[in-house]
Amino acid sequence: MPHLASRTRRWVLIALAVAVGAVAGFAVQQSVAVRASWKVLPYQTLRLSGSDNELDAVVLDIPDPTPLDVSQGYIEIEHAVRLHVVSNTPWKIQITAPDLPDALASLLQVRSHGDAYSGISAEPRVLAAGANGAFEISIDVRVLRDSDGTFTSDDPVRLVYTLMSD
């Protein structure tokens, strides 16, 4: 009888192997290949450094001129505004002064720290640009002396900074 038990055991193992193979083959036939894809959308934020709000304003008070300012003919305020840029695409910041009084158009200049100063106007111009990442942009302001020898005006100036993909 030991021979019969081993023969039965062999047939059970063969039947089990065939059953497992059939189930695996059926499962392979029933499996589905799924192709997954995704798209990373552009993301950008522009904030005043130290602020949690995307929409914010800063008031810049022009200091009293020093004797050096008077002799140079301008007051220079380095790091007057600091902007924080986060972008996953190449970007640029444009500046405009949409309601700049004509009297101040030729007296106010700005630059990204380290660049050359240029005037501002109602027409947007590129102030800074960069690649993707996070950046701190420091803005310098220069106020030129008016024809009457003064540096100040009672007219407020609203500067608008706009971040956009380059």
Image: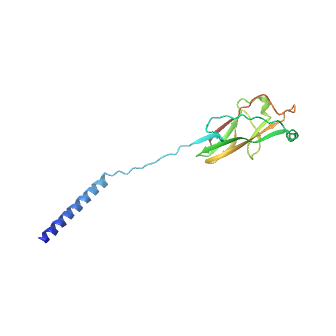
Q: Tell me where residue 30 appears, x and y as whole percent.
A: 30, 51
Q: Is residue 153 above or below residue 29?
A: above
Residue 166 visible from this viewpoint: no
Q: Tell me where residue 16 appears, x and y as whole percent.
A: 22, 61
Q: Which quadrant, please, contains the C terminus? A: top right
Quarter of the rendering containing residue 94: top right
Residue at image x 52%, y 45%?
40
Q: Tell me where residue 14 appears, x and y as whole percent.
A: 21, 64
Quarter of the rendering containing residue 69: top right
Residue at image x 18%, y 66%?
9
Q: Is residue 101 above or below residue 10?
A: above
Residue 20 visible from this viewpoint: yes
Q: Tell me where residue 138 appears, x and y as whole percent.
A: 71, 44
Identify the image's colour scheme: rainbow, by chain, secondary structure or one colour.
rainbow
Quarter of the rendering containing residue 158: top right
Q: Is residue 1 left or right of residue 47?
A: left
Between 61 and 103, the residue placed more toward the observer is 61
Instruction: Count up the numbered dots.
Output: 0
Residue at image x 83%, y 39%?
74
Q: Is residue 160 left or right of residue 41?
A: right
Q: Is residue 52 left or right of residue 147?
A: left
Residue at image x 65%, y 43%?
84
Q: Which quadrant, please, contains the N terminus? A: bottom left
